[in-house]
Image (spheres, coloured by chain):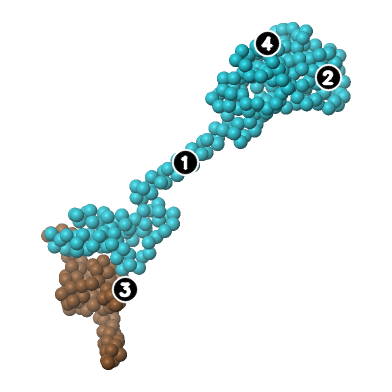
Chain colours: A cyan, B brown
Amino acid sequence: MTAEDYVRRVSLELGDLPWRQRRDLVAELEAHLAELPEETNFHERLGAPERYAADMRSAAGLERRRGLVAFLRARRPRNLILLVVTLAAIGLAIGAVAWIDSYQPIVFAGGTQLPPDSKPSAGQAGATVVFRRGRPFEYGITIHNDGRFTARVLGVPRSATDFFKARLYVNTPSPAENELPLERFRPFDLHPGETRWLVWKGVYACTTGMGGGGGGITTEAIAVRLGFLWRTTTVLIPLSDPLTITFPKGCPSKRVAPPTP
Amino acid sequence: MDQAQLLKGVLELAVLAVIARGETYGYEILSTLELAGLDGVGDASVYGTLRRLEQAGHLTSRLEPSESGPARKYYVVTPVGREELRVGLEAWSRIGGALGELLKP
């Protein structure tokens, strides 16, 4: 073992000490080794470097330091690796949580089941239908999971601008989106690439306070409650075919209990 | 009882005594101690003792440039150090006498 090797190993053993103390001890050791005759076998004369380091500590009255500061100070490759790995793991965890919180894969799939007697809207996309209190109402849209992970469709919240009393239905999963065996809505998993119909069937009803005549509402997006891992959120699915309802006779402000979808 | 344990307690006295004979440096002190029969103490302890004595003001040092390697540190005992040595040796003989008495059959 050369003098440099010996000094290096002792220095490593003293890694937890403040750099000034370590520097002084190492300098002392270097001077000591320089005084020894040339052919000295350092290991034999001084003992193992680790042992010499321990002797230096006890001679100087220095305890082995513990704690985070000493750990970082020791600057062994192992410690640095542990530190980097820990920081990377924390970074990944934060990134993962942020991603999960923003995951929203549901889109409007382009399919619309229009209410009976609807007509294409004038001067804009979508259709228009005239409100007729008590008459049958039916409306459906397709939603599609555009992402890579399954999301759970938990429900469609009632809206203050709902103009109908209806039940919500969903079709059983099928490869051809035109098949419509419908059943009452229950929360379901929408898998990546899957498309499903959400259909409301009921009657026109005034559930909002819309006085006067000649008004209209355009539904441009549907609110859907989604669950993904631990997160529940309500997302707005924009519709490329909005539905406009006109109220030539208005909608008297009568509070009606909203039906359950 | 382990000789090393006993030696640690008197190492400061021994080191001061060696240097009091005349200016000297680390390795020479080690050899002198060894020749005198104090060889169980370990190099690190001797160098640690030198540093402590210098910090306490019992020794001063100077650097002598050397042709073969880094400068060598030479130590001398200070007046304070001599006083310490005197007091220490007195205490040592007192203790040695007492122990001798106790060890008598």
Q: Mark 2 points at which residue?
A: A205
Q: Which mark is residue A125?
A: 4
Q: Is mark 2 on a helix, strand or loop?
A: loop
- Locate residue A16 relative to residue B61 in the image: left or right: right
Q: Which amino acid does label 4 sit on?
A: Ala
Q: Which amino acid does label 2 sit on?
A: Ala
- Letter of the chain that mark 4 sits on in the rendering: A
Q: Which amino acid does label 1 sit on?
A: Ala
For the N terminus of chain B, give its image quadrant: bottom left
Q: Residue A89 carries which label?
A: 1
Q: Quadrant of residue B76?
A: bottom left
Q: Are marks 1 and 2 in contact (CB under 8 Å)?
A: no
For the C terminus of chain B, give its image quadrant: bottom left
Q: Name the residue under label 3.
A: B56
- Letter of the chain that mark 3 sits on in the rendering: B
Q: Do the residues labelled 3 and 1 touch (CB within 8 Å)?
A: no
Gap between marks 3 and 4 measured at Cα: 94 Å
Q: Where is residue A182 in the image (x, y as percent from the top left)?
A: 71, 17
| Residue shown at the point (69%, 20%) measured from the top left | A170
Of labels 2 and 4, the one closer to you: 2
* Residue B104 sits above or below residue A95 on the image: below
